[in-house]
Every structure is written in structure tokens, then in C-alpha cells.
Amino acid sequence: MNDAAERKLALSHLWVAFIAFIVACFMGEYQVLERSGLIPALDSPTVYFASVSTHGVLMGFVLTTFFIMGFGYYTASTSLKVPVWNNKLAWVGFWISLLGTLLAAIPLLTGNASVLYTFYLPMQAHVAFYLGATLLIVGSWIWCGIMWVMFKQWKQVHPKQPVPLAMFATTANALLWLWASAGVALEVLFQAIPLALGWIDTVDPGLARTLFAWTLHPIVYFWLIPAYIAFYVFVPKQAGGYLYSDEAARGAFIVLAVFALPIGFHHLYMDPEQAKGWKLLHGIGTLVVSIPTLVTGFTVIASLEIAGRLRGGKGLFGWIGSLPWSNPMVLAVILSLLMLILGGFGGVINASYAMNAMIHNTAWVPGHFHLIFAGTTVIMYFAIAYYLWPMLVQKPLFSNSLALIQLWTWFIGMGILTTPWHVLGLLGQPRRISSVVYNTLLTLAWKPYELAMIFGGLILLGSACLFIYNLAKTQLNPVSGVFTQRVEYAEAIHPVKELPEYLNDFTLWNRVIAVLMLISFGVPILQFFFMNTFGSPGWGY
Amino acid sequence: MNKMNEEDRKRILEISPVGTFALMAVVIGSMVIAWLFLYFGVFIPRGMIN
């Protein structure tokens, strides 16, 4: 199959994602510097919060959405061995999302949307920010639709055959995102945009936070699922082995798609607008969603163990040393899993109803999500890029050694950045502060940790530059000749020939999600229309 | 990579991943210990919120 159209489509999405990423990395380093107070000339809350907001939007919305769309199109095409359905529509989605990104960038960079990437109302941004964010999401919905159509069309042509795992997981992510993004879409359409345009005078912050909580946790899994896809479908093959269990992988993606959604209130444990019972229900769901992560950890490590033993590894742990550590995909998964263990532990503390009070709104929280997102997730985005880039540009990777150095430095930098961040949280440093203008024994105790974070950030910035350099050099390399490498998906030890429909389709799970969402969000949202609440005028812009 | 006969290969594919079980046990055990440490060693000694 000539996949030139798919390669161009994927490459365009990935470049937008990685340009956003590198810009955001520079901002991240500026932010740790500014927060430390080390360089007084940098001290500016106005610039700081504009930067934090832009950094968050670029990393959390632009890098992820464009990466997931580009990776998804290429995965759909290569795993199903068909062209992307309606390529023109896919390009319409790309341009809508890009237009939205550029539209949102204007108020962000001019300090007119310093509302952080969570944009909690009644903080108010320029309407262009909300319209831009909406367009970005609308573009991603087109991607979801295309994935859904390709999934269904393939099933029609191949009745009773198992959908390739990579496509099954990609469709699970599209379904998850359609559900997840509905919460923030409702908030933006019915609260943020009318407020920004002056159509309404006040908004209910409780309702806004409830709607954002609908999106806020599943979005993390939307970001994480491409990493899990690489764990399951690329890593075993790259390590020289087999996937331990195809069925376990499908089960994990289903539970992720279903239980990532009705659990967002663990972000609202300290909020007054929801009752304790609802929070507890969501808290239990949060612990349930750790199960697919454990299943994933087990299945991936078991796949690596098989590969290590096939390569001659002996003993209980001797197989670890036999793995091909010089393969970027294998190295990345090992480093990613290490960060997942540490970040996962932080997540368990966050989800613990009582202990959440200890770390709520402290520096622990950004420390945690940087470890999970920028660590576990983004390091796999790098690995996927290193693996796919040669196929997308039809040239060999410029430097494998540079890729390995980049992955190690990202891991080390992330450790140096996020460990002090967690400690600062336990020492009581609030999150979302630009600088400390008073000196007490408490704040002076923060200094060494802030200095360590600057160093960690510098390593990360250098690592990010290496990543972009390697990709650009690969693409611009004047090597000519026929490049024949194709995407190789891992085979399971026991390949599935037939699957029950509940492991091969999402119709049932879509209904289960609808019921769970109705249970977990129905009353908590409806209550706002029956209670006498007092709205708040917008502020901050 | 060393050479391996088909019999060894089949055996490896069929055996239980004991190394993985051991690693998972270590990880989960460490998490439980770390959680207990944070709860009883850090959280509880801080006392009630004033």
C-alpha cells in the first residue's frame, strides 16, 4: 500500500505537536527560575502566569491532541492496512485544530488568558482563548469520528475477526475522548463564552468546576493511552519477544475507557459544592482505574521477561540485563515504567480521601502530574517518534546514540525536577504561586529544592532540544535510496483467533459508560438547577 | 543474542513469568510500605487542621 498520504498527514500533526512541546519546555525552565527568585530581573507575576498558562495549554492540549491524532491516523492505517477514511476530512480536522491553537495563542501570549490550562471560572480570559480551545477540540472530534468509522468499516469487512489490538486501543481512546471532552465543552459553550462575550453577568463556579472535573481526569488517560498502545504493540516486538496476553491488553483498555470517566471528583475533595458521598463514590472509582494500570504493568513486564529469556537471560531477574537496552523503545519503556511506579504512588496519595488534605493545592500536585505526564507519557511519545520517524520520512534515524542519551537525560532531569517538587509540597509550598516575597524559616527551607528544580529543568530543556535536533536531522538528511522498513506490531504468544463481542467492540461499553456517567454526574450537575446558588462575576481580564 | 533450540524456545513461551511476579510483588509491597509511612509517619503526626 502506498501510504504517502497517511505519512504526510501523520507527520504534519506530529510536527505541530513537537513545536508546541519545545516552546513549552523553554517556558517551563523560565518558570522554575522565576519562582525561585534567583534572578530578580525575571520577577513578574504577570509574565509568569501568562507563561504558566501557555505552557499548560501547549503541553496539555496542543502536544497531546496533535500527537494523538497523528499517531492515531498512522496506527489506524498501518494496523488495518487501509488508507485513512476520508483523508480530506482528516485535513479539515487538522486545520480546524491548528486555527484554534493559533487563535488561543494570541490572548495567551499577550497576557489576556492567564487563567492556567484548567481555566477555572470565574477567572476569565479573552473570548478568543475559549473559541480557540473549542476549535482545537472540534478538530479532535473529527479525528474521533474517523477512527470510529474505520473501526466499524473494518469489522464489517472482517466479521467475527479480532480487530488489531493497536486499532482497538486507538478506538477506545477516541471513545474516551468524545465522552471526556463533553464536560469541558459544556462549560465553555454555556458558561465561559457567554461570560466572556458579556451575554451573562455571572457564572456558577461550582457548576464550572464540576463540569471541568468531568474532563479533568479522563483527559489524563487520553494522553496516556498512546503510551500504553506502544507498551503493548511495539515494545514486545522491539525487545525481541511476544505480547504476553492480547486479551489482558483489551480488557485493560476497556476498563480504562469505562472507569477513567466517572471519577473526576477526586479533584474536588476540598471543594464545597459536592457532597461527601459523591466524592467517596468517585474516590472508589479512582482506585478501580488503578487496576488496568497494574494489568498493563504486569503484561508489559511479562512480555519483557519473555524477550529477555529468549535472548538468553537466566534466573529471577537475569532477563533484565539481557534486554536490548540500546533500542530506544525498550529503554523508554523501562524508564517510563519506573516513573509510572513513582508517579502512581503519588496518585494513590492524591486519591486517599484523608491524606489528600495534606497535599491539596501544594507543590506536590504539579510534581505528581509532571512525573506521570511529562515523565511516563511523554517519554513514550519520544520513543514512538524515534520508531515511526524513519518510516514517516523514509530515511534512517539520524542518531540512535543521541536518542538514547536524550531518553536517559529526560529520565534523570525529570527525577531531579519532580522529587524536590514533591518534597516542597510536603513542606507546605502552595502550587500556583509566582514567587515568595517574604522570608521566613518555612520559605527559606524551600530554597535548596527550588535550586535543584532549576538544574533538573535545565537538563530537561537540553534533552528536549536533542530530541527536536535528532528528528529534524533525520528528516533533512540528504540520504537517498529505497527505505523499506515498515511498522511491526507485536504478536501475542497465543494469537487470538476469535473473541467475544465484548472484547472486540464498544457498543456495550458505550452504554455502560452512559449509565455510570448518569449515576456519578447526574445528580451532582442537576443540583445546580434546583439549588439557590449565587453566581460570581468574571475576574482577571 | 545466543542461539536457542526450538524446545527451549517453546519452554520459555509456556513458563510462568516468575520474575514479573517477583517484581510486581516488590513494587506493590514497597508502595504499601511507603503509603503506611506517609500516613502514620507524616500525615497523622501533623495533627488536626487548626
Image (cartoon, coloured by chain):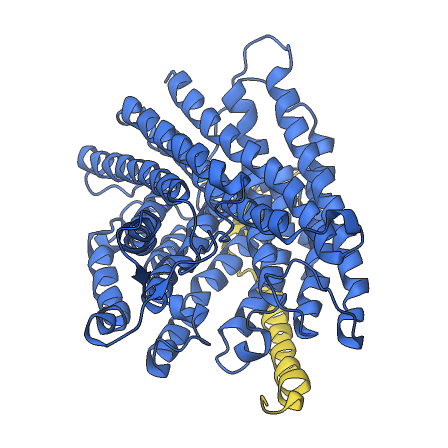
Chain colours: A blue, B yellow
Q: Position of residue A358 (x, y in %)?
A: 59, 78
Q: Position of residue A258 (x, y in %)?
A: 32, 60
* Up-down relation of residue A520 to residue A406 (above or below): below
Q: Position of residue A24 (x, y in %)?
A: 60, 41
* Up-down relation of residue A184 to residue A285 (above or below): above
Depth order, front residue of A499/A36:
A36
Please tell me which residue is depicted at 18% across the width and 36% down the height of the picture. Answer: A156
* Up-down relation of residue A238 to residue A222 (above or below): above
> Is residue A181 found left or right of A433 in the rendered image?
left
Please tell me which residue is depicted at 39% across the width and 76% down the height of the picture. Answer: A284
Residue found at the far top of this picture: A480
From this viewpoint, is residue A237 visible? Answer: no
Task: Please state, as top left, top right, bottom left or bottom right, where the N terminus of chain A lies in the image.
Answer: top left
Depth order, front residue of A492/A182:
A182
How many discs appear? 0
Rendered image quadrant of residue A436 = bottom right
Q: Position of residue A103 (x, y in %)?
A: 42, 34
Rendered image quadrant of residue A359 = bottom right
* Up-down relation of residue A477 to residue A28 (above or below): above
From this viewpoint, is residue A282 visible? Answer: yes
